[in-house]
């Protein structure tokens, strides 16, 4: 038995949570140990979020939680009850309800060829959106530092920074 908040939790017990994922509110029952990453990929079939290292070191699993970038492999789904989650599949919806337009960062990644194999791209995109939301990075060096938690094994870093810098200079839109 696991102990949570002083009450025993049986191994087969599920906990009711509510998450707004990419604009859609979902009532879910999850095991207490289910990571947000596994919930998104395995239960909700949102496979854009990648499982890379499963230790929070590569950033492939980055999603936005209430607008802030989070490594979803390090967060239990029950800890985010009531949160608003945006995955790479939902970035276009940030442009407005029913929007089919790409997010400006998605457009910039295409324009600047900011990906090669594409495995890290969903995490890079979500982290980039979070970086712009934070508003702390003002230079290329600050962008690089702020994005250092997202690894690209293909080495597309220069193009990724170019894309982020382009959108940042345009005021977050293009």
Image (tube, rainbow, N blue to C red):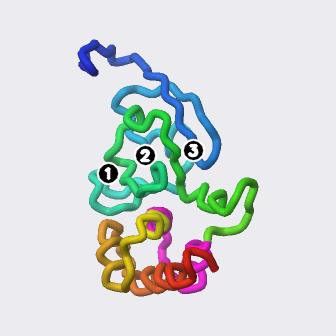
Considering only order in the chain, which callout, 1 or 3, is on the residue closer to the N terminus?
A: 3
Residue located at (40% from left, 26% from top): 31
Q: Quadrant of the C terminus?
A: bottom right
Kind of element beneath mark 1: loop
The residue where tag 1 is placed is 54
Q: Residues within 10 Å of mark 2 (few under 14, many from 20)?
A: many
**Label placed on residue 37:** 2
Q: Nearer the viewer, mark 2 or mark 3?
A: 3
Find the distance from the CA under tag 2 to the CA under tag 3: 12 Å
Q: Are marks 2 and 1 in contact (CB under 8 Å)?
A: yes
Find the distance from the CA under tag 2 to the CA under tag 1: 9 Å
- Quadrant housing residue 102: bottom right
The magenta span reads: 104-128
Residue located at (44% from left, 22% from top): 15
Q: Residues within 10 Å of mark 3 (few under 14, many from 20)?
A: many
- Please, what is the dominant secondary structure of the magenta stretch? helix
**Residue 55 in the figure: left or right of residue 162:** left
């Amino acid at each position: 038995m696991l102990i949570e908040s002083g009450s025993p939790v049986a191994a087969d017990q599920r906990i009711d949570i509510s998450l707004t994922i990419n604009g859609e509110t979902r009532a879910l029952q999850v095991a207490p140990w289910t990571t947000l990453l596994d919930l998104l990929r395995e239960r909700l079939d949102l496979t854009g979020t990648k499982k890379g290292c499963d230790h929070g070191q590569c950033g492939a699993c980055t999603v936005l939680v209430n607008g802030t970038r989070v490594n979803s492999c390090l967060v239990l789904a029950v800890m985010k009850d009531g949160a608003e989650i945006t995955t790479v599949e939902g970035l276009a919806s940030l442009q407005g309800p029913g929007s089919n337009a790409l997010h400006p960062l998605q457009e910039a990644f295409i324009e600047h060829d900011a990906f090669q194999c594409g495995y890290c791209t969903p995490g890079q995109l979500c982290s980039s959106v979070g970086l712009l939301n934070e508003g702390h990075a003002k230079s290329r060096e600050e962008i690089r530092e702020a994005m250092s938690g997202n690894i690209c094994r293909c080495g597309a870093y220069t193009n990724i920074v170019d894309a982020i810098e382009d959108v940042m200079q345009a005021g977050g839109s293009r």
